Image (spheres, grey):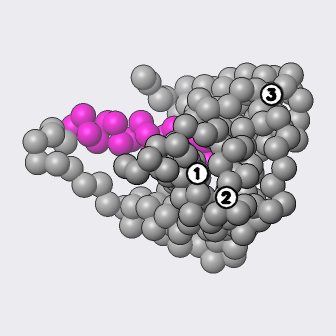
Amino acid sequence: MSEQNQALEQLDDHELVEHSRTDSSVFGVLYERHVSRIYNYVFHRVGNVHDAEDLTSRVFYSAYSHLASYREQGVPFTAWLYRIAHNLLANWHRDRSRRPVISLDDIILSSPAHEHPEPMAEQHESARQLNAAIRNLDAERRELVFLKATGEFSNAEIGKILGKSEGAIKSLYHRTLLALRKELENKGFER
């Protein structure tokens, strides 16, 4: 790693944004720093690798394209990236609802040869039930669950992303967890 790259790694996100405005290569540091979290968030919302990769690249393209308009507002730079992802996902889901597609990722269960099929099947079924319960939530609650699952944001930061107060986020999250638990119990989900 070059001395310049080491120096850039030491900068916080807001400093990197400022440098990226005059040197586009610096944006690569921001990309490397945040791509896996944004990808995971997108993947959990779309459920397949191909669409997640495509949408993640669109998030970073959009962020780079609009870097001049970015203003630090007391929340992490990643909050801005998640907001971009949220908007792209909303458009993607709206477009997909007009033309439903069945993903091969939902159909194929691949198993490494060294694992026993019964525990894998049970694990797959548990994950499927949980994902189905989360998908049954309204869009705002789904978004909240995914943002909380990253463990990256405080309630106040999530509130800014979703346009709500910190107290409203706490309350909504508590009610969401109770609703998920109730739905899973009604379906006989055991953990």
| N-term mark: 2 or 1 | 2
In the figure, 117 relative to 102: above or below?
above
Spatial separation of the CA atoms under disc 2 and disc 1: 9 Å
Q: Who is closer to the viewer here, 70 or 6? A: 6
Q: Amino acid at mark 1?
A: Leu
* Mark 2: few/some/many CA within 10 Å (<14, 14-19, 20+): some
Secondary structure at badge 2 equals helix
In this picture, residue 180 sits left or right of residue 32? right
Kindly check if marks 2 and 1 are in contact, taking CB atoms under 8 A apart as contact: yes
Q: Amino acid at mark 3?
A: Ala
Q: Which residues are magenta?
A: 118-138
The residue depicted at 59 percent of the width and 29 percent of the height is: 151
Secondary structure at badge 3 equals helix
Secondary structure at badge 1 equals helix
Q: Quadrant of the C terminus?
A: top left
Kindly check if marks 3 and 2 are in contact, taking CB atoms under 8 A apart as contact: no
Q: Which residue is mark 2?
A: 20
Q: Quadrant of residue 23?
A: bottom right
Q: Say the numbered circle drawn on residue 30.
A: 1
Residue 149 visible in the snapshot: yes
3 or 2: mark nearer the eye? 2
Q: Who is closer to the viewer here, 149 or 74? A: 74
| N-term mark: 3 or 2 | 2
Query: Residue 33 location in percent, x, y?
Result: 53, 46
The residue depicted at 67 percent of the width and 58 percent of the height is: 20
Spatial separation of the CA atoms under disc 3 and disc 2: 27 Å
Q: Say the numbered circle drawn on residue 156.
A: 3
Q: Say the numbered circle drawn on residue 61.
A: none
Q: Amino acid at mark 2?
A: Ser
Q: Who is closer to the viewer here, 25 or 161? A: 25
